[in-house]
Image (cartoon, rainbow, N blue to C red):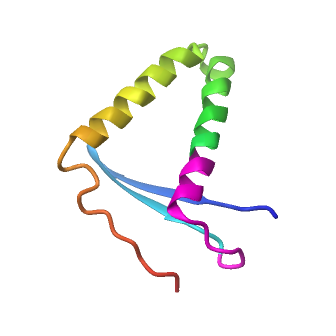
Amino acid sequence: MKYSVIVETEIFGRNANVYIKYPSDQPKLTFSETSHILVSGISLLLKLVEQQEGKPDYKLMEEIVEHLNSEFVSIKSFSDAKVYPKK
């Protein structure tokens, strides 16, 4: 089966709202399954960045790992995360 994950972002200056959505006609994925799908997408983008931007993939990987670490260290990051039930 083909699964889709929809990522929407609203950016307000230095803040952003990120929404993870799923098409209504597919089975609901767990947060763990969704995380693995999104990481696969990031891996694909990492491999393509050198072709499009000339930036080595390992450099972007370092930036992404640093970004993830900073999100987990911050007591503010995602402290307001919410799950909205499927309508």
Question: Is residue 22 in the magenta section?
Answer: no
Residue 12 lies, with reference to residue 65, above or below; the image says below
Q: Residue at x 30, y 41 (%)?
A: 71
Which span of residues is magenta-colored?
Answer: 24-38
Quadrant of the rendering where the N terminus is positioned: bottom right
Q: How many marks?
A: 0
Q: Is residue 57 left or right of residue 14?
A: right
Q: Residue at x 62, y 24 (%)?
A: 49
Q: Is residue 58 left or right of residue 16?
A: right
Residue 83 is situated, as x and y percent measured from the top left of the image, at 39, 72
Q: Which residue occupies the extreme bottom position in the image? A: 87
Residue 68 is situated, as x and y percent measured from the top left of the image, at 37, 36
Residue 58, quarter of picture: top right
Residue 28 is situated, as x and y percent measured from the top left of the image, at 62, 73
Question: Is residue 37 in the magenta section?
Answer: yes
Q: Residue at x 58, y 18 (%)?
A: 57
Residue 53 lies, with reference to residue 32, above or below; the image says above
- 13 or 37: nearer the viewer: 37
- 74 or 7: nearer the viewer: 74
- 36 or 66: nearer the viewer: 36
Q: Which residue occupies the extreme right position in the image? A: 1
Q: Residue at x 29, y 42 (%)?
A: 72
